[in-house]
Amino acid sequence: MSTKLYGTVSPERQKTMSGLEFVKGLASGVLPLNTIAQTLGYDVIEAESGRVVIAVDPTDAHLNPWGTVHGGLTATILDSCMGLAVQSTLEKGVGSTTLEFKISLVRPVTLETGQIRAEGKVLSCGRRVGTAEGRVTDTKGRLLAHGTTTCLIFPS
C-alpha cells in the first residue's frame, strides 16, 4: 500500500515556497504528487536545483496495442521531469508551464525493460523562458528516449 499523497497544492501554498522547496516537497512526500502521477504510477525520486528525476515501473496498464509501453508514458515523464527541473530554479511567487516539448523515442520500452527513469536538467532559465533537456534510461543506463522543453515563466 502506497503512503504517497496525491492531489493539488493550492496556489496560496505554492506562493509561500520557492520552486526548489516545492519540488523537494514532491520528492519527499511532504507535498502531494499530481493525480496523473497516481494514474500512471510514477514518482518524483530526486530533486535538486535544476535537476529532477522521475521513475516508473511499466505495467500492463501502460501497453499500446502492439504490446510495448505507450510512448505517452515516456512523453509524460519527460514533460514532468523537465518542467519540474525548471520550476526548481524559480523564486517564491513564480510559476512555469510548458510551452512546447519535443521527444525522440530511440528504443522500445517493454515490460521486460523494468523500471525507467527520466532525468530533467535545466539548460537555461531567464525571467520569461526556461529550457531543459531530459533523458529516459533503463536500469542498465541505456538511452530509451530524450527530449527538450521550453517553459513560460510567470508570476503565480
Image (tube, rainbow, N blue to C red):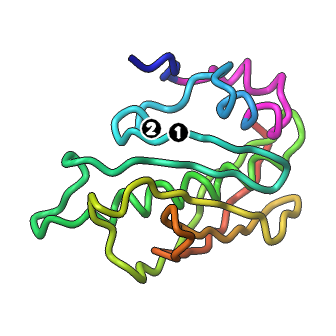
Task: Indicate the amino acid at tag 2.
Answer: Ala
For the residues labelled 1 and 2, say whether their Cβ atoms are less than 8 Å apart.
yes
Residue 89 place in picture, x, y as percent: 85, 50
| x then y, percent, for residue 4 | 51, 21
Q: Toward the viewer: 31 or 106?
A: 106
What range of the chain is rendered magenta? 8-22
Q: Which residue appears farthest toward the front when viewing the image? A: 140
Residue 53 in the figure: left or right of residue 13: left
Quadrant (top left, top right, bottom left, bottom right) of the C terminus: top right
Identify the residue at horizontal 42%, vertical 83% (top origin).
106
Query: What residue is rendered at 63% in x and 20% in y?
Result: 10
Between 121 and 140, the residue placed more toward the observer is 140
The kind of secondary structure element at disc 1 is strand
According to the image, label 1 marks what residue?
43
Q: Position of residue 34 (x, y in %)?
A: 50, 32
Q: Quadrant of residue 31?
A: top right
Kindly identify which residue carries mark 2: 37
Residue 22 x %, y %: 75, 32
**Is residue 16 found inside the magenta-colored segment of the image?**
yes
Q: Which mark is residue 153?
A: none
25 relative position to 126: left or right? left
Q: Give, as a three-letter code, the residue at label 1.
A: Asp
Question: Residue sitting at 73 percent across and 68 percent down?
Answer: 131
Q: Is residue 125 above or below residue 96?
A: below
